[in-house]
Amino acid sequence: MHRTKLDDTAIASSLQSLNGGAAEPWSIENGKLHKTFRFSDFSEAFGFMARVALVAESMDHHPEWFNVYKTVRVDLATHEADGITEADFELAGRMEAIAH
């Protein structure tokens, strides 16, 4: 998995691919890949977080996230690259699959 900081063109292209079928799109906020997931209740939100945690641990790539009731706010960036990398887009794609 590449952990080299992507340039703006690569980020725009990857963001377009990631958002292909997403009801709520990912965006770039404060230099990070960002999305807020909304679920039917707390249990569904927490279950999503538990499933993502297993994937993130296997990738050795961990999200910044915040949960209140049925929402999970996610920010992804690669600290050692000081920006967004392919690893962030891979984790975002896995999150999308888990959420659906």
Image (spheres, rainbow, N blue to C red):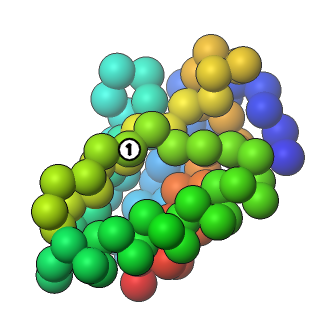
Query: How many numbered markers are drawn?
Result: 1
Give the image location of residue 39, x and y in percent: 21, 75
> In the rendered image of this protein, does residue 87 appear above or below residue 71?
above
Residue assigned mark 1:
65
Residue 42 shown left or right of residue 25 in the figure = left
Confirm whether residue 36 shows in the render. no
Residue at image coords 37%, 34%: 28
> In the rendered image of this protein, does residue 71 appear above or below residue 60?
below
> In the rendered image of this protein, does residue 70 appear above or below residue 83?
below
Secondary element at tag 1: strand
> In the rendered image of this protein, does residue 7 appear above or below residue 73?
above
Residue at image coords 76%, 54%: 59
Give the image location of residue 90, x and y in percent: 66, 56
Residue at image coords 16%, 81%: 40
What is the quadrant of residue 43 in the picture? bottom left
The C terminus - image quarter: bottom left
Please, what is the three-letter code of the amino acid marked with disc 1?
Trp
Quick one: 1 or 6, which is closer to the camera? 1
Residue 72 shown left or right of residue 14 in the figure = left
